């Protein structure tokens, strides 16, 4: 290939051409070619938007499932925690507890004595 043929091939590939003054200018595109290009790009853009919506919906569903699982887990832990907490007694049960004798089972008995309210130690 001679130099002129290489210049033509490069000129067609780059889309620019050199004018007489040595400056490069863009090759004009015909309006028909431009409309054909737009007509081909519209279906591609629509497909890309649909794929984007699909992946966004899948991602949103995964996040919703994760939030639901974490929420159920916290609810379960809170429920178990509340079941293990002692219940707050009513006023009537508080009064009944003060009348009863308190028995401590884990205490070590050092000296066995019997006490009554109206008597001293025996």
Image (cartoon, rainbow, N blue to C red):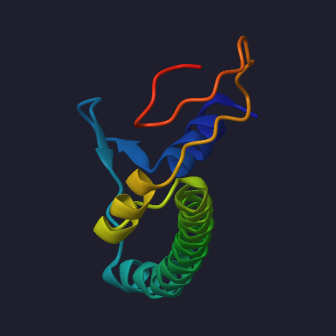
Place residue 62 in its image quadrant: bottom right
Question: In which quadrant will I find the C terminus?
Answer: top right
**Seen from this angle, which residue lies furthest top?**
110
Q: Residue at x 53, y 47 (%)?
A: 101
- Name the residue at 62% across, 60% down: 80
Q: Nearer the viewer, residue 62 or 20?
A: 62
Would you place residue 44 above or below residue 3 in this image?
below
Q: Is residue 95 above or below residue 41?
A: above
Quarter of the N terminus within the rendering: top right
- Name the spot of residue 12 as percent of width and height, x first: 54, 51
Nearest to the observer: residue 67 or residue 53: 67
Closer to the camera, 32 or 45? 45
Is residue 33 rendered to the left or right of residue 52?
A: left
Picture layout, residue 80 above or below residue 7:
below
Residue 18, horizontal then vertical, whole percent: 36, 39
Decide: is 111 above or below 37.
above
Residue under the point 58% across and 75% down: 61
Q: Residue furthest left?
A: 21
Give x and y (percent) for residue 103. 63, 41
- Position of residue 34 measured from the top left corner of the image (x, y, whole percent): 37, 78
Q: For this view, does 95 lie left or right of residue 43?
A: left
Q: How many marks?
A: 0
Q: Nearer the viewer, residue 65 or 59?
A: 65
Q: Is residue 116 left or right of residue 90?
A: right
Q: Quadrant of residue 113?
A: top right
């Amino acid at each position: 290939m001679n130099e002129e043929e290489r210049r033509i091939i490069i000129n067609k590939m780059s889309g620019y051409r050199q004018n007489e003054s040595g400056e490069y200018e863009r090759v004009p595109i015909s309006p028909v070619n431009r409309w054909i290009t737009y007509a081909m790009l519209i279906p591609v853009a629509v497909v890309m938007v649909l794929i984007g919506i699909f992946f966004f919906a899948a991602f949103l569903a995964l996040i919703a499932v994760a939030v639901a699982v974490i929420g159920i887990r916290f609810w379960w832990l809170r429920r178990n925690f509340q079941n293990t907490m002692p219940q707050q007694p009513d006023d009537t049960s508080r009064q009944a507890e003060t009348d009863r004798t308190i028995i401590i089972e884990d205490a070590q008995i050092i000296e066995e004595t019997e006490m009554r309210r109206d008597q001293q130690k025996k």
